[in-house]
Image (cartoon, helix red, strand yellow):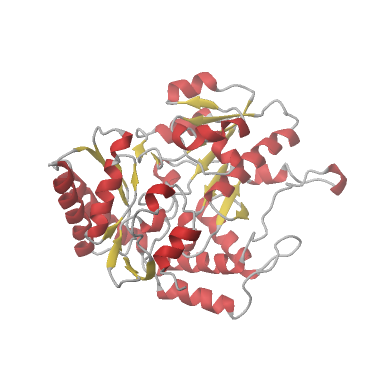
Amino acid sequence: MQHSLADADHRYLWHPFTQMKQWVAEEPVIIEAGQGAVLRDVTGKEYIDANSSIWTNLHGHRHPKITQAIKDQLDRIAHSSFLGLSNVPAIELAERLSKLTGLPRVFYSDDGSTAMEVAIKMTLQYWQHRNQPHRKKFIAFTDAYHGDTIGAVSIGGIQLFHQTFQPLTFEVLRAGNIAELKKLLSDEIAGVCIEPLIQGAAGMRLWPSGMLRAVRQLCSHTLLIADEVMTGFGRTGKMFACEHEGVKPDLMAVAKGITGGYLPLAATLATEEIFNAFLGEYTEFKTFFHGHSYTGNQLGCAAALANLQVFEDENVLKKLQAKIGDLQSRLAMCRRLPGVVDARQCGFIGAIEVGPYRVEEQMGVKICRLMSERGVLTRPIGNVIVIMPPYCITGEQLDKIFDALAQSLVTIIT
């Protein structure tokens, strides 16, 4: 018996961050193709990708330069082991990333969670090599989100996502602001983790201006780990969020936009001082015993190199400034819409908060469902509607996003 795609989805799949009882009662949107900022489903209906396919897609779907780079790489090789071997695109990408960040050492992994997992393990082992094994505690911030692997969950601070897995995690000290961070710092602290400028999964909450710089100053005797998984590669208006406050972390995790939204790839960048602490004789076992089967994957690295070339060739960051201004003006208008309690922005990241509504009301979900019916796809964080489109978005498409949002709010709230 032939099943429809929707039937097969409901029968066989288990979607992330999704209550499947509710999912199987609904008709799914099944994407078949995309071009630029537009996605098309199997029925032929088109949607604007208003959250860049969960914050990953930078220059639009099927960008010719990235697509061609992957095709060219496929004509050579798709993947070979990075354990005891190297490859051309991984080397070239590491050099580009090092020059962009000022952090000279690059360790590849697969996604944001694993990039943070690497940073956590590197930090702990670094202090052991520095003969300070008592430094084994970490500080992270209230409502932090750093991924879903166990180490990343440990430093995460969102109860809804992390409470269930608490028996598997290690204890982390939690700060809500600079004053609390000062009180927690001691010679037992191995590292401090922060999402620079903005906390994503917390509902796009903005840090006060100067917060990141102050954290860097306080971490002069411990390691600062910057989670640039969401904010990296132009999202905040600069290539990396740390640049806004002139901060150079000891470790930086990047992922999501690194390949322009094409393939899974991540990197943890480190200082030379950290790298040097792992050098020794074979029998000293100072090696960093961590890795992934697809570490340094050639296809992913080729896509990432093409992504960075697009930034240069198309002068992306300069052109993005005007669009950041366009987003700002539209968010300002949102503050007058029914139910809106705040509209905030960090670079090309927009967040519209409605409420207050109880969790069981699923107001964010309902608003996004109505927006989908109007040809705009995004995903809420509780009562926060995230608008984070690809950089190639046009003014007309941006208008359509906010028209769909306004119409949906009027429909559901008034």
The picture quadrant where one finds residue 360 is top left
User: Which of the pair 389/96 is nearer the observer?
Assistant: 389
Q: Is residue 3 shown above or below 215?
A: below
Does 2 appear above or below 50? below
User: The C terminus appears in which quarter of the rendering?
Assistant: top left
Could you tell me if residue 224 is visible in this image? no
Image coordinates for residue 319, horizontal then vertical, percent: 30, 61
**Residue 35: horizontal and vertical position, in percent?**
34, 71
Please, is residue 322 above or below residue 149 in the view? below
Could you say where residue 22 lies in the image, as x and y percent from the top left? 37, 48
- Residue 160 in view in this figure: yes
For residue 224, what is the image quadrant?
top right
Q: Residue furthest front?
A: 1
* Image position of 281 (left or right of 122): right
Does 332 sit left or right of 205 as displayed? left
At 73% from the left edge and 60% from the top edge, which residue is drawn? 83
- Check the image and name the residue furthest to the bottom: 75
